[in-house]
Image (cartoon, rainbow, N blue to C red):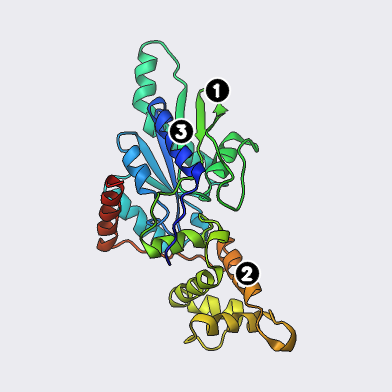
């Protein structure tokens, strides 16, 4: 599925981030633990290469724990500090990561008799939970939160402690989504607005991936007896199983599509991870970085 979507506010977000990156001590990057490859922006990886950074595999409570461990090992073997978190629960672990990242700078300031205010930038693609994390660390609703991309449109400094400030940044995609699998996966988690994709094709694709990964959960949730079904036939079975029928017994495909996407995004289809680390992921990442260099 080809998706070409790079709204103006994302180009602006990139400019703002470039202006601020030299002013921060460290970076927290969030990705979605259900798709740790597709939900990382290679443009960010380049822009932040020289900054102390921790990668948070967020929404880990929705992901397969075994696969999350595989991803953690994958990233750590490549020198990336990381942690699996749920943005609304693991505030203390995130604060400890910030302390580790900025320890040297804080100690150097202390040696000169100064108490340093640590400034940390929070980045990631749309809808991975940046604002939710900041609100949790702050202890109140100071950053806008929504279940759709584009809620945060501008950088916002938020003080979360006497000596800690966080910069909430807009979710940012990269200009060309040439990898059709990555584009599809980003759309699954609503990092790309439903209005610009074919939601029928998207939800059918999601069902086909889920039926390969977790067939029993899908069969139970939607009362599917024939797990060999694919495409529209599979979506029609979902509609029949959940009673999404119109007059004459015709499947209400529009409702079925909406429910499948919503229930996946809300974690109602079980703890599922759609991507597994292996050698081809490294090759893909190198290719994406080369594409970025050419832009």
Residue 162: image tag: 1
Residue 154 vs 249, above or below: the answer is above
Measure how far apart labels 1 and 2 are at the Cα level: 44 Å
Label whose residue precedes the other's in the sequence (1 or 2): 1
From this viewpoint, which residue is outermost toward the top? 113
Question: Residue drawn 44% across and 49% down?
Answer: 173
Q: How far, Cα to Cα, is label 3 from label 2?
A: 36 Å
Q: Nearer the viewer, mark 1 or mark 3?
A: 3
Q: Is residue 72 left or right of residue 252?
A: left
Q: Would residue 263 appear left or right of 43 to someone viewing this image?
A: right
- Mark 3 — residue? 16
Q: Are marks 1 and 3 in contact (CB under 8 Å)?
A: no
Q: Earlier in the sequence, mark 1 or mark 3?
A: 3
Disc 1 and disc 2 in contact, CB within 8 angstroms: no
Would you say residue 65 is visible in this rendering? no
Q: What residue is at 36 percent from the left and 53 percent from the top? A: 72
Q: Earlier in the sequence, mark 3 or mark 2?
A: 3
Please tell me whether mark 2 sits on a helix, a strand or a loop. Answer: helix
Which residue in the protein does label 2 denote? Answer: 259
> Foreground mark, 3 or 2?
3
Query: Where residue 153 sits: x, y (%)?
Result: 56, 40
**x, y (%) of residue 70?**
35, 59
State if disc 2 and disc 3 touch (CB < 8 Å): no
**Between marks 1 and 2 in the image, the one whose residue lies nearer the viewer:** 2
Q: Using the rendered image of the protein, determine whether residue 280 is visible from the camera's viewpoint.
A: yes
Which residue is drawn at the image coordinates 51% and 63% (left, top)? 188
Q: CA distance from mark 1 to mark 3?
A: 25 Å
Q: Viewed as shown, does residue 235 lie left or right of 64?
A: right
Element class at badge 1: loop
């Amino acid at each position: 599925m080809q998706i070409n979507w790079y709204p103006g506010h994302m180009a602006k977000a990139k400019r703002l981030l470039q202006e601020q990156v030299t002013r921060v001590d460290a970076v927290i990057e969030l990705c979605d633990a259900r798709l740790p490859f597709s939900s990382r922006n290679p443009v960010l990886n380049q822009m932040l290469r020289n900054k102390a950074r921790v990668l948070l595999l967020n929404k880990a409570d929705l992901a397969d724990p075994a696969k999350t461990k595989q991803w953690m090992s994958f990233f750590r073997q490549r020198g990336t500090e990381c942690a699996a978190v749920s943005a609304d629960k693991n505030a203390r672990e995130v604060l400890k990561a910030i302390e580790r990242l900025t320890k040297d700078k804080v100690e150097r300031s202390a040696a000169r008799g100064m108490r340093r205010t640590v400034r940390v930038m929070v980045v990631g693609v749309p809808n991975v939970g940046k604002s939710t994390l900041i609100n949790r660390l702050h202890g109140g609703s100071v950053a806008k939160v929504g279940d759709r991309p584009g809620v945060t449109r501008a950088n916002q400094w938020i003080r979360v402690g006497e000596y800690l400030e966080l910069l909430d940044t807009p979710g940012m995609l990269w200009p060309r989504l040439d990898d059709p699998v990555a584009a599809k996966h980003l759309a699954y988690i609503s990092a790309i607005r439903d209005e610009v994709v074919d939601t029928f094709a998207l939800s059918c694709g999601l069902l086909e991936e889920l039926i390969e990964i977790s067939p029993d959960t899908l069969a139970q949730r939607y009362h599917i007896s024939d797990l060999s079904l694919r495409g529209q036939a599979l979506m029609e079975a979902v509609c029949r199983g959940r009673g999404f029928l119109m007059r004459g017994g015709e499947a209400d495909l529009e409702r079925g599509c909406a429910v499948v996407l919503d229930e996946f995004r809300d974690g109602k289809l079980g703890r599922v991870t759609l991507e597994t680390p292996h050698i081809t992921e490294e090759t893909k990442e190198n290719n994406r970085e080369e594409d970025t260099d050419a832009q």
